[in-house]
Amino acid sequence: MLQRNLGCLFKLLLFVGLLSGCNHLFYFPDSDERLTPKKLKLDYEDFVVTTKDHVPIHGWHIKTKAKNPHGTVVHFHGNAENMTTHVLYVAWLANFGFDVVTFDYRGYGSSGGQPQRDGLVEDGVAVLQWTRSHARTQDLFVIGQSLGGAVAVPVIAQAKIVGVRAVILDSTFASYRGVARQVLGSMWLTWPLQWPLSFLVSDSWSPVDSIADVHIPFVFIHGPTDPVVPYRAGRELYDAASQPKEFWTVPWDGHTSAFAVEDGRFRQHLVEYLCSRRTSQASSCP
């Protein structure tokens, strides 16, 4: 029910935003604190990195208790609220021997600035560069959650960070204009206007434009009944990516819900996949 309500809210905000010609309609940030690694009893450090355009970006470096971490996962969270909402999406990986870096885009949480498309790409580049310098592991992995995946793809293409072994995109869309058109086409009220209204959305930095240039293994995760990002939007991005790539279909309802089930099959599948992509064998991996 919550996921369906979020889907309806997204569609409503998209419609209203398009009528006003607004390209910020993909971002719904706030600064409320909900959950922290401290509350989860996880070891972590705060960090602040300054972007190329001088915006301070706040993040957490969550450290596994394992003596030799298996790898470092960099998390690009979704479009709503801030990282204190989304930390549970990746925090569980610390219990499987992985360090985790998560951060707030500009305008989210305690990061500076205001969210806008090219700025979020700058944020991601700065955080990936920081991670490469501060990670305790040679192997890095990137996981993008919904909008976070759309940000992560051009970031990886721009940053060209050494040591990124795989990219996981969960419920991510191929293009900003395309997903706007698909969402508008799913509502009877806006179906006739899906084409003209969608052109009010800039398609700059859409992941489909750069994903073929990223020669890193990809995993795509999406469910056919996703109430927020249409399944076909995820398949379009998968089709545009270079090999090697995999597509994991989530058989239940929800948006970015694959890892919501503790000890579920997708958590185990992800850990096994990350372990299989490591180059460093300094520690045993499940």
Image: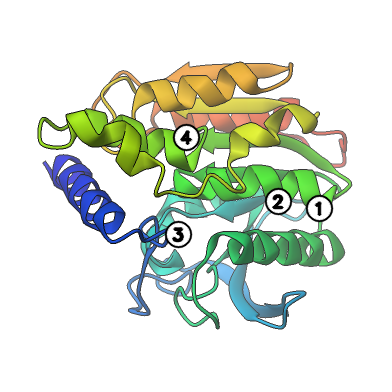
Q: Nearer the viewer, mark 3 or mark 4?
A: 4
For label 1, the crowd category at 10 Å Cα-Cα, with few meaning under 14, some 14 to 19 and many 20 or more, is some
Q: Would you name the residue on which mark 3 appears?
A: 87
Q: Quadrant of residue 44?
A: bottom right
Q: Residue at x 60, y 26 (%)?
A: 219
Disc ID at residue 155: 2
The quadrant of the picture occupied by the C terminus is top right
Q: Residue at x 40, y 56 (%)?
A: 79
Q: Position of residue 127 (x, y in %)?
A: 71, 65
35 is higher (above) or lower (below) than 6: below
Left/right placement of residue 228 relative to residue 121 reads left
**Residue 16 occupies quadrant:** bottom left
Mark 1 or mark 3: name the one nearer the start of the chain: 3
- Spatial CA span between label 3 and label 4: 21 Å
> Mark 3 or mark 4: which comes first in sequence?
3
Disc 1 + disc 4, Cβ < 8 Å = no
Q: Residues within 10 Å of mark 3 (few under 14, many from 20)?
A: many
The amino acid at mark 2 is Val
Say which element carries label 3.
Answer: loop
Question: Which one is nearer the viewer's eye here, 281 or 148?
Answer: 148
Estimate the x, y position of residue 255 in percent, counting from the top left. 32, 37
CB under 8 Å between discs 2 and 4: no
